[in-house]
Amino acid sequence: MISGLLFFNRNRVLNYLLVIAFLVLQIVFTVYEYLHIHTTELNYFTADALAVLLLATLTVISIPTMYHSYVYIKTKKDNPKHRAIYFSAMVALLTAISAAYLANHIAVTWIFVELTTLSASALIYHRRNNRSLEGTWKYVFVCAVSITLIFIGILFLSFTLQQAGTDDLSFAVLIKKAPQLNLFWLRLAFIFIFTGFTAKLGLVPMYTAGIDAKDKAPSPAGAILSSVLMNMGFVGIFRMYTVMANSPLHLWTNHVILIAAILSIFVATVYMTKVKNIKRMFAYSSIEHMGIVMLGLVAGGIGYYAAILHIIFHAFIKSSLFFQMGQIYRIYKSKSIYDVGNYFKYNLTGAIVMLLGFFSATAMPPSGLFISEFLIFRSLFEANYLWVLIIVMLLLTMIIWAFGKNIFKLLFSPAVDFKENDVERINPAESLSQFILLALVVYLGLNPPLEFVTLIQEAIKNLPH
Amino acid sequence: MANVLLIIFTISLLYLGIAHRLLTYIKILAFQGVLLFGIAFIELIQINIANLTFVLLETVVFKAIVIPYFLNYVIKRNRITRDSEPFLPNFISLIIITLIIIATFILSNAIADDRISKIYFVVALSTLFTGLYIIVTRHKIITHVMGYLVIENGVFILSLAVGNEMPMLVNLGIMLDIFASVFLLGIFVNRIGDVLKDVDVDQLKNLKD
């Protein structure tokens, strides 16, 4: 509703007031859902533990997103219609993602995933030049095909239910009836649903659309696309995984996800050593992290806990990197590695953020990602997946090298052919949000509050230990 | 009677493989919409009347009238040339689509589940794979959209197979249809024609590493 108002209203002050109203509503909604955990509302939405955790993540990230969107729009030419479309699409996207987190019926999740495709493509197209049109078209097309694949998976899922004698496709019923479902159709259903959701999550085989989308979208929108949207893909796959884990097909499911995860990390490594565009590098890094999360799911044991931890931390870190990217673009007017350099001289706070962000994203201590990755590796070791562990560690080393090579060029080497005359002065206060997000990751990693830990453990209680 | 309509639907797929002109593609899509209307009318007798009218209206109005009209408008407005520019010669397409239909038939024999009527499964899967094949083997961007519409028709037939027990799934399929095609066509009508002068998929290769 707020989105509709935003769309039709072009007045600048009113736009901003509506956005702030939306943020306040979002915060209130998250608190409400936390207090009402496990109640079912409107027959289709249940705030279970995973939903509350991810909803809180979404709220925390959406506040700096709106702030950075405001900064971004302010520095461009002031076109009221484009601004209205941008903000209304952003609000619609955040609402659709929240609803997709909360849905307890697979068809309702599917509807909201489709809505996110539509609103995200409006965001990607914001700059309205040829290349962003191409990115938008690719994104819409690949996501449309993936959504169709998910729908076919849902149809196959309904075939499985006929033998168990029920009609209901909500997740609670599916988990309960899991041992009795028809195995052949369940396999097919899982393959289709998994392939469809990899377009949102960013794994092989459908990750390609997401890369172009994060590259072409404006930086705050790119932050949303690469953190919270990927979490939505994770929710879809996770809920389906709990159903499969309670059925006789647990081992087979693990093998399928293992293949996809290793291929994703491999693809991310190959492209990261080759890429020259900083935003695309961040996008490939997201793919690598999602591959690691899936490995955690496969490994089991402490891996379940670590996977959810990794998802939440990665959302914070990747969004702060994208916010910083907005500032980099404003200074150098280019996203290519060849055109940037000596960042410490032009923007001291931003450079510190970049350095800390690099350490956090490559999972060096004291970043929270270090803890979650360590736990995932330990769970892989305990589950006897030794060869997988060795291959993944080798690939991750190469990724750290590629990432570091580019970041250090940005920070320390002098820029080639860069005119220093009219460099934009960036207000240091703009980097404040990123410091807060990175600090939050460190705090949650080293000293997580008790409610946080309890929520995660509740989220994974349906999986067999 | 429904079986006859389904078989005619499969034959229209073969015709899709050898069609030269874009206008023929549009006419086949409209024809498939009318066939789906007939199949839905015969099969879904058991669900309640309001739902049934909605489904029937959607197939006729949307698939058979609105979408072909939109596609026509896009072609005329962007002055897209008449030929469909396939990568492979049309005769080979015909053979490949025949092989697809035979392969899905053999596949569905291996599945052998009594609850699902076999012919629905065969027709739906072959439509799906034919749609994918059309997307992959044609030069123009607008044939991508047409291939996607063929896939949608296949998904609709698959949802009709369980439509009597779970009518909500048929509704969801229709919603997918409306959303995705309106959006795809919307972008196409408004933007791609203006921006990319030459509607060829080679134009979409700028975003690389």
Image (cartoon, rainbow, N blue to C red):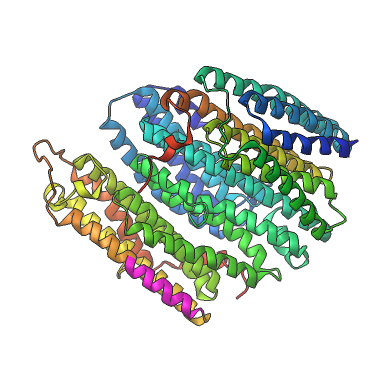
Residue A338 placement, left or right of A251: left
Q: How many marks?
A: 0
Query: Does residue A289 show up?
Result: no
Q: Quadrant of the C terminus of chain A?
A: bottom right
Magenta stretch encompasses residue A396: yes
Q: Residue at x 36, y 54 (%)?
A: A318
Q: Residue at x 54, y 76 (%)?
A: A301
Magenta stretch encompasses residue A42: no
Query: Does residue A39 show up?
Result: yes
Q: Can you give x and y, in whole percent of width and height, for residue B96 in the image?
A: 68, 45
Q: Residue at x 48, y 66 (%)?
A: A262
Does A59 sit above or below residue A267?
Answer: above
Magenta-drawn segment: A385-398
Q: Can you give x and y, in whole percent of width and height, for residue B4 in the image?
A: 87, 36
The overriding secondary structure of the stretch rendered in magenta is helix
Using the image as rendered, state which of residue B114 and residue A289 is in the foreground.
B114
Does A44 sit above or below residue B1?
Answer: below
